Amino acid sequence: MAASLGLKLYNLGHRREPGTVTVRPPRPSGPLAWLHAPNSAQVSPMLALAQRLSGEDGMTSVLTCPVDLAPREGILLQLPPPDTPVDVRAFLDHWRPDVAIFSEGELRPAALHESHERGIPLLMVNARTPVFLRERDSWYPGLMRSALGRFAQISALDEAAARAFRKAGATLSSVAVTGRMEEECAVLPCLEAERAALARVLGARPVWFAAGVTAQEEASVLAAHRAALQQSHRLLLVLMPETPGRAEALAQTLEDQDSWTVAQRLKDEEPDTGTEVFVVDNPAEYGLWYRLAPVTFLGGSLLGSGPTRSPLEAAALGSAILHGPRIGAHGPVFGRLGAARATRAVASTTDLAEALGDLLSPDRAARLAQAAWAVVSDGAEVTERLIEQIRQLSDGSV
């Protein structure tokens, strides 16, 4: 009775705006999962799950989240429906999900109630702490306990998170400490013939890659390279500017004004033994340079608004990571990498030069890259178990 009253009070707390129209693409045929990421930190693991479901099971995912994302095959991106009975019913009538997976702990009582009424299995993953929507956060008698009771399983990050859910009213049997799901980390492709050919050209030369460098950072990167050349005179810098259109002018400036020996990818030139800076310009080749360079500096992190590329890209391909203090939208990932001592943080041009010199030692770069790879692969077993549970729930075997 209290839970029913709590839900009524909750539903009265939000009125649907008149004239609101939501445009949704047609529902594809076949099985479909509704995945909900309440914030940017949960988008990556939910995308990783969606890609696995699409690739391995042919299951389409509707991912609701508050951030704009590039389209991905097998994943339909939508804004989450307002948590009112009318909006949720329209959403569920259209998509008819076979299973719904929420994350972190955000509770949408109207959505949970309507899904439960339709017999849609509900899971909570990467669970940290149970909360109502920020704009609807209040006390509703019995509502949190009732909402948590809708979930078939709540997969908690750790024991502290599990205690938070049990204390809020989740049943002991529904809460399990599983750990973190894996992040989205598609291994960037490259043409193997191209990689092999360049590897032969480079031979045993030490190489580092400055990825997506902002115009403001170019001087710092080049100063670090000049300092490192004193230690390793055959060192090659592969330089990818943030704006590919700057590549040709940048290469010309480096040659004419700064006396660097430069080769340009744009002109199909190859770095010979005398080349000091190899300016590259094709964003589709990031995977190639991460494979060839044992050390990568993430541009945008020293004198920008944050890395122009995800640190997981370099980590997945075995390149040790150098980065500045500006981490932008990648805070949670850098937090995990930092906790694992899997990156080298620098605060200035001098720091960058010193760190680069240190990582020219192959064993030190390898230790850093190995630690980063462990972070990238962390959570794969958790996601694998979740996928198996989704399969069982979807076919009704549990």
Image (tube, grey):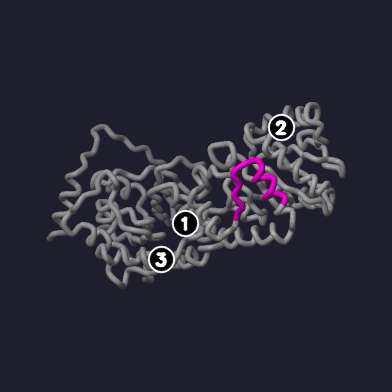
Name the kind of residue labelled 3 in the image. Asp
Q: Quadrant of the C terminus?
A: bottom left
Q: Which mark is residue 158?
A: 3
Name the kind of residue labelled 2 in the image. Ala
At mark 3, the secondary structure is: loop
Distance of label 3 from label 1 (alpha carbons)? 29 Å
Distance of label 3 from label 2 (alpha carbons)? 47 Å
Q: Earlier in the sequence, mark 3 or mark 2?
A: 3
Residue plotted at (78% across, 51% down): 206
Residue under pointer 1: 59
Crowd band around label 3 with a 10 angstrom C-alpha radius: few (<14), some (14–19), many (20+): some
Q: Earlier in the sequence, mark 2 or mark 1?
A: 1
Most prominent secondary structure in the magenta stretch? Answer: helix
Distance of label 2 from label 1 (alpha carbons)? 42 Å
Residue plotted at (63% across, 51% down): 321
Q: Quadrant of the N terminus?
A: bottom left
Residue 161 location in percent, x, y? 36, 63
Q: Which residues are magenta?
A: 343-357
Residue 394 occupies which quadrant of the picture? bottom left
Q: Earlier in the sequence, mark 3 or mark 1?
A: 1
Residue 217 location in percent, x, y? 64, 36
Does the stretch in magenta take in 348? yes
Does the stretch in magenta take in 17? no
Residue 227 occupies which quadrant of the picture? top right
At mark 2, the secondary structure is: helix
Q: Which mark is residue 247?
A: 2
Q: Which-is-in-front pick, marks 2 and 1?
A: 2
